[in-house]
């Protein structure tokens, strides 16, 4: 459903922008102009636009994100070094060695694992 008014992504985007982070946003249900108007972020074209990102925060497991094949995802995540996945949408994906993946909030999330300095 196309409802954004209570999306936690809005506050996250605002917080990042206030800290001077260049933010790109994507939602397959919204047009680029709607994305920009609602969030103030630059619209991202998925998956090609991932090439601009050093960090990806995946908030919602839209079908488009679930069905993109591993090769396409790896090709377009060339510079992404961190992926934070809110629901484990990409949990079973194979990323390049330089990419750190963390599921945060899904059923497999265990905050006590891993090195806090990573």
Image (cartoon, rainbow, N blue to C red):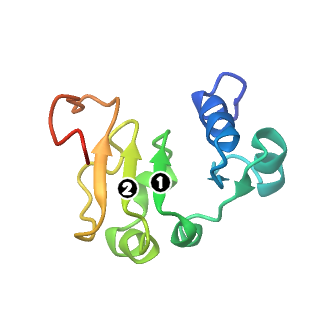
The image shows residue 85 at horizontal and vertical percentages of: 38, 43
Left or right, 30 with respect to 62, comes to right
Residue at image position (24%, 31%) is 109
Left or right, 51 with respect to 28, comes to left
Residue located beneath label 2 in the image: 82
What distance separates the C-alpha of mark 2 from that of mark 1? 6 Å
Residue located beneath label 1 in the image: 56
Whether residue 83 is situated above or below residue 6 in the rendered picture: below
Left or right, 91 with respect to 114, comes to right
* Residue 68 figure quarter: bottom left
The image shows residue 113 at horizontal and vertical percentages of: 15, 35
Whether residue 31 is situated above or below residue 17 in the rendered picture: below
Q: Marks 2 and 1: CB-CB under 8 Å?
A: yes
Residue at image position (77%, 53%) is 31
Residue at image position (67%, 33%) is 10
Q: Earlier in the sequence, mark 2 or mark 1?
A: 1
Residue at image position (65%, 61%) is 44
């Amino acid at each position: 459903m196309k409802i954004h008014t209570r999306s936690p992504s809005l506050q996250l985007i605002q917080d990042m922008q206030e800290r001077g982070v260049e933010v790109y946003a994507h939602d397959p249900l919204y047009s680029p102009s709607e994305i920009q108007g609602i969030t103030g972020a630059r619209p991202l074209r998925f998956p090609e636009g991932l090439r601009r990102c050093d960090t990806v925060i995946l908030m919602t497991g839209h079908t488009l994100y679930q069905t993109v094949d591993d090769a396409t995802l790896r090709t377009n995540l060339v510079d992404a070094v961190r992926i934070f996945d809110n629901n484990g949408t990409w949990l079973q994906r194979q990323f390049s060695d330089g990419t750190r993946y963390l599921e945060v909030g899904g059923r497999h999330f265990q905050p006590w694992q891993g090195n806090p300095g990573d």
